[in-house]
Amino acid sequence: MSDTLDQAVPAAPERSASPRTAKDYASDMEVRWCPGCGDYAILKAVQKTLAELEADPDRTVFLSGIGCAARFPYYVDTYGFHTIHGRAAAIATGVKLAQPELDVWVVSGDGDSLSIGGNHLLHLLRRNVDLVYLLFNNEVYGLTKGQASPTSPVGQVTPSTPGGSLDAPVHAGRYVLGCGGTFFARVPDVAQAQQVEVMKAAHAHAGTGFVEILQNCIVYHDGAWSTVTDKKTAAERQLWCRHGEPLRFGEGGAKALRLNAAALTLEAFTPGVDGEAAEVLVHDAGNPMLARLLCELDEPTALGVIHRRDAAVSERRHHAARPPQRREPAALQELLNGSDTWRI
Amino acid sequence: MDEPKLGEGALVVRFAGDSGDGIQLTGTRFTAAAAFTGADVSTFPDFPAEIRAPAGTTYGVSAFQIQIGRRTVRTPGDRVDVLVALNPAALMVNLDELRPGGVIVADSAAFTDRNLKKAGYAASPLDDGSLDGYRLVALDVTKLTAEAVKPAGVKARDAGRARNFWTLGLVLWLTGGDVAKSAAWIAERFKANAQLVDANTRALEAGHAFGDTAELARVEPVLEAGPSPLPGGRYRSISGADALCLGLVTGAHLADLELVYGSYPITPASSMLHGLARLGAYGVDVFQAEDEIAAIGVALGASYAGKLGITGSSGPGMALKTEMLGLALAAELPLVVIDAQRGGPSTGLPTKTEQSDLLQAVLGRNADSPLPVLAAATPHDAFEMAIEAIRLAVRAMTPVILLTDGFLANATEPWAIPDLAALAPIERPPHGTRQPYEHDPETLARPWIPAGTPGLRHRIGGLERQDGTGSVSYEPANHQRMTELRHARVARLADAVAEQAFEAGGTDDDILVVGWGSTYGALTSAVDQLRGEGLKVAQLHLRHLSPLPRNLGDLLAAFDRVLVAELNMGQLALLLQGRYARPVASLTKVAGRPFGIGEIKNRVRAELGVEA
């Protein structure tokens, strides 16, 4: 392996005309994640999404912080900025402020987003900056060799927690909704088709399209999401949320969710067996309370676009509030003069 | 004699009272009235960290000092000639600053038992003879104001608010001024409320008339019309903070750039946030971020996307920005960072001045990470240095730190309004089709290729880059080369700035006084006076602290004695000794206040072995 990750520069000015393919968005850099890492599948899904969106690579920017996920921008042939730990959200906000029309994607991990970068993520979400935010959640610090992360479950044994992780984990969905996030989706790394579908929805959303990707770290936390992703149990464990459709899961959609009004929770039942079909909840992505309840579920795990609502976008608000521009030299000279002058 | 005495064409007035007494407003209006007569002025607002400290307490005293001269004045003055004390606490805190024989104007109504006790007086100093060494003018200002504003229909309990205008009127009379300028300001400022205009104008005029009818002896008629010590031209009053904001906007104009100012509230840098927030029409986007890190992050993101990112803070906030500065340096993106220094460490003295962030600015990052560091010397110099910071950032594709301080930010002086058309444009080399890290052979700067530029997409980041392509590189030789490039890029800026010149004297003198930043006024005045006494003292004042001016070593080598004066424990002295391997003497002060002229003169005399 060479000590240099090459980038072809300057990039070829024009690509083949559409339809584009995922390969059109692959950079020349050698991908350096561990063999079997879930990131490969995500990279492929993102490149496929960009192709389906016919994204202009010159108008697309990937930003990242630090961590395994943060190497992502090197592997996408767009503009890219690999920044510092936890701060990509802040830098991305500056990019959008300066050039609101750029298509910005932030790629981050659970430590980057929810530990060191938690404050920036909070403010990105409440401002509703118009970008796509991909959180690769593998419940572990991979690049620093396997320490417990803010999403590690209690009891997870790692080099930094030999007796098991002690503190309660952060749930990305609860965090996003609690911060006033306007879009929250969740998808496993192995669900290629659904990833593309969800990323396209996040991209179409005006505001922060936040996608939590359940990502497997094959080296330090292998099988973190296997109860969700295992083919044998997938039907029972995966609840795919689609706006306007019944919240059904299980083999052939035999099971469903209903509201337990007394307990203020969602509960699973089998229509026709222990309840009526009329009780089946229909997904309303625009309802933030339903989204919160869906995020609380563990068995089954809610996937897909869990929440999406319209709200004003930060940088548009910012630019709309800008006073009429007075950029001509005479206006600046007038400013320098001020209003209270005297002659000597 | 260390300070000019009464009658030598300059006068120092200090207004002091509770932080809710409108002291800063009174001081500002008095300054405007004085400057309007052609006098030279220099001001020093001195307010407590608490917004509204309990009334009558010593720690709640707010003050505003101004020196007015029919000759050049460069500082707010060492010693106060006229002290206006609106309560006992104000007298207690400020009496030490008053020269023997100086004038005290006191509001006797405020010298109640309760207020005296709060200020720590056992008996009223107005009656116990303790002020016999001064000229005491004790008046019931509260009552006199109430009587004056009565015809305006103001209730007695609201009349106290006009007390500052009555006092202003009196001090205008004492200094030979008239009320026209101040009355016009009141009419404009309160035009929405006719009663307020009436009441405040009455108070102002009554204070002025009182001096006349009571036949109070005038102190020093510095406000009487007379020749001005300033060069001819059109002037306005400017604070360091305002000059800096105007400089940033002007610099951006000269470089044909728009600005994004990312900031988080911190004293004393917030005045820039407020100042720039009002300049949205001039291509400035102000973004109040969630913290200091995001403030510089937003600025850096803006620079990456082709606008010029700027951030401002003070010492503790600078510490938080450090890692992002390293990224800006590694990513070779232009950025301007303004550090309005204050007393430290930690929270320290938020509203008091100090120059103790110099080493933090020059050296305070992990690894070998040089960047240009500039310092503004005076309020109007803040305008020039803001433009200079933008010029260097764009030229060398680097973050630049511009140091100001709490004193400079708040100090005001008359400013000869610059002619925009006479200012040189700031060149931005076109990126062409150069590779992302292809360094210009002269400036060693990479091209600025904003994200979104057609056909030139590339990836950058904090990992070490390959010289040229900008690809990630861990090659030993490349890291050596890139580190050397980062040093040389900053060092070469010395060729892009003027050689260091003497402020006074030259290499034939016996001692060289070296300073930087806001101590300029005190140092220049001190050297001026010492030279007037026949001592052979030279002076130079650094505006470029990294890189240091290319001829500085030669200038220092020409002197047997070099005295470095700064408001810290000797940081520039350390840098100069390290850089030029020569001993220097160090005059330091960390009292939260600027140098007095006298203390500088005493030290220079001591270095020369001369008696005062």
Image (tube, rainbow, N blue to C red):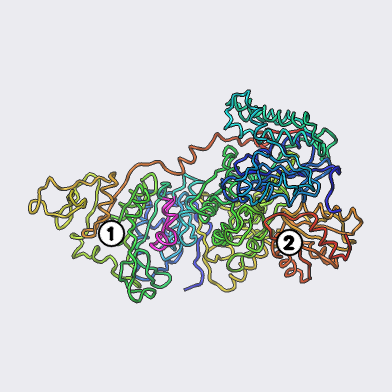
| Quadrant in which the C terminus of chain B appears | bottom right
Q: Is residue A119 left or right of residue A177?
A: right
Query: Is A336 drawn above or below residue B183 in the view shown?
Result: below
The chief SS type of the magenta part is: helix
Q: Which residue is mark 2?
A: B548
Can the viewer see residue B92 in this picture?
A: yes
State which region is magenta: A104-124
Q: Name which quarter of the figure residue B495 lies in.
A: bottom right
Q: Residue furthest right?
A: B534
Q: Which residue is mark 1?
A: A191
Badge 1 amino acid: Ala
Badge 2 amino acid: Leu
- Residue B285 appears at what percent x and percent y? 55, 43
Report the number of numbered marks. Answer: 2
Tell me which residue sits at (86%, 42%) in the image: B7
Q: Residues within 10 Å of mark 2 (few under 14, many from 20)?
A: many
